[in-house]
Amino acid sequence: MKRQISFSFSLVLLFLHCSQTLSQPPTAAPAKAPAAATAPPLAATSAQASPPVMVPVQVSKGPVNVIKILQKAGHFAILTRLIKSTQEDIQLFSQLNDSRDGVTIFAPTDGAFSAIIKSGVLNSLTDHQKIELVQFHIIPRVLSTANFQTVSNPITTLAGSGSRFTLDVITTESMVNVTTGLTNTSVSAIVYTDSQLAIYQVDKVLLPLDIFAPKPLAPAPAPPQPKKDDGEESPMIPEDTSGSVTCMVHNTLFMFAVGIVAAAIPL
């Protein structure tokens, strides 16, 4: 009897335990750990950037002002002073705002000017030569980098054209080379560009032949011809008659001697 009661009590306990187990909600699966953030791929770098590069310059609204653009870009202080001292900024302003052709400027950096400043060349130039030097860096039409591939050489600048102002632009796959006959450099950066103005940084001053190449010597002037006054008679040069007088004396003496001999001969 006691064994039956114990067995029955065990069944009751087992039943209660199973009921509690089935009534509990299933255990939630462990949350997955968040995936590690994927690092952005590194930008491809090269040993040397392909020039020209773009220099970020924000220009204030209003008429285009080359001086302000160069000042905001920096490292163009000497070129800026030259443009202002030669009053080429006035012509640039007029060209940009009164003409549809636009302007292209090759802008040497301050470092580019250092060579001709240390040697004293820049200070030795006359005012007219400084104007020519500035104008030689300005093309009176806007040229994009794509235009350089089809432009006809030599390019006419504000300084003029011809053999004394030769400026050639030669393009390769990623380079724009500029040559003058004395200077060979390349465009290293695009300072500013829009539909009316393009400014390209160059690392050498473009030297025109008209200023920095020795000019051929002019031929020596012919000696002056003596002037003859028509109203003045030429002086008379006495004729040398000494030969005639000697001949007459000899003839007289000969005739006199013949006469003496004839008189001495008896008839």
Image: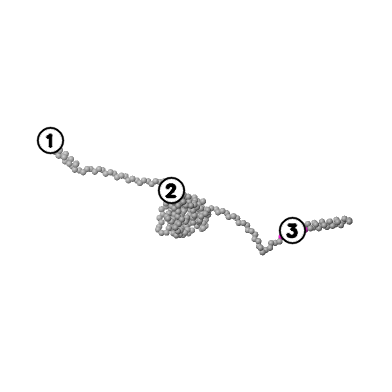
Answer with mark 2 or mark 1, whichever residue precedes in sequence.
1
Residue 238 shown in magenta: yes
Circle 2 Cα neighbour tier, 10 Å, few/some/many (<14 / 14–19 / ≥20): few
Residue furthest right in the image: 267
- Element carrying mark 1: helix
The Cα atoms of the two marked residues, 2 and 1, are separated by 98 Å
Q: Which residue is mark 1?
A: 3
Precedes in sequence: disc 3 or disc 2: 2
Is residue 111 among what the camera can see?
no
Q: Which residue is mark 3?
A: 240
112 left or right of 228?
left
Precedes in sequence: disc 3 or disc 1: 1
Front of the two marks 3 and 2: 3
Label 2 amino acid?
Answer: Ser
Magenta span of residues? 237-245
Q: Element at badge 2?
A: loop
- C-alpha span from label 3 to label 1: 192 Å
Q: Quadrant of the N terminus?
A: top left
Give the residue drawn at x 48%, y 50%.
170
Element on which disc 3 rests: loop
**Residue 171 or 59: which is nearer the viewer?**
171
- Circle on res. 138: none
User: Label 3 is placed on what type of residue?
Assistant: Asp
Q: What label does residue 50 carry, if any?
A: 2
| Residues at marks 3 and 2, CA–CA distance in whole angstroms | 94 Å
Q: Nearer the viewer, residue 54 or 144?
A: 144
Indicate the quadrant where residue 11 lies.
Answer: top left
Q: Position of residue 52 (x, y in %)?
A: 44, 50
